[in-house]
Image (cartoon, helix red, strand yellow):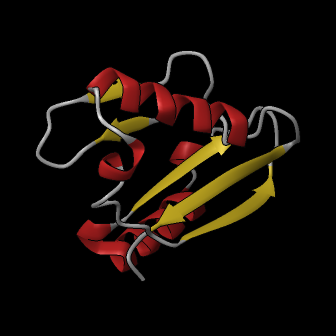
Amino acid sequence: MVFRRRNVRAYFIVRYSYHGDGIVSALQVLQAVITIGDNLADFIADLQLMPQLLKTSPYFPGKNWPINEKFKNVQKRVLDKLGSDGRILVRASGTEPVHTGNGRGRN
């Protein structure tokens, strides 16, 4: 997770937690605010929220999914639809036998 404030060269990289746990995420935002020396209202003043979509699919151990043709075709279609204003993240779940795909974009 990287926090970036517009017009400020300040990046905060999460070192210990890579999941969406709300409490950990909130503490990391507060740490970023304190590190910059700003208040929370000013820190999020130009925040632009982007809708996101989360999908899961079964995970089959031993399958090399990043080079799977079906996966690559779906990935290309999603990236084409998102254009330059979006991103996707695909990863194996740490708690379930599934892959999690998270897409974020303006639409």
User: 29 left or right of 61?
Assistant: left
Residue placed most toward the observer, 19 or 76 = 19
Q: How far across and how far down the image is residue 19, in percent?
A: 66, 36
Can residue 21 be spotted in the picture?
A: no
Q: How far across and how far down the image is residue 52, in percent?
A: 55, 68
Q: How far across and how far down the image is residue 99, in percent?
A: 72, 48
Quadrant housing the C terminus:
bottom left
Residue placed most toward the observer, 14 or 73 = 14
Residue at 44% over, 75% down: 77
Q: How far across and how far down the image is residue 34, in percent?
A: 38, 25
Task: Answer with the quarter of the image where residue 70 lies.
Answer: bottom right
Extreme top residue here? 16
Extreme bottom residue here? 107
Extreme right residue here? 96
Residue at 48% over, 63% down: 75
Task: Answer with the quarter of the image where residue 12 lies.
Answer: top left
User: 92 left or right of 97?
Assistant: left
User: 74 left or right of 38?
Assistant: right
Task: Answer with the quarter of the image where residue 97 lies.
Answer: top right
Residue at 11% over, 46% down: 7
Can residue 46 be spotted in the picture?
A: yes
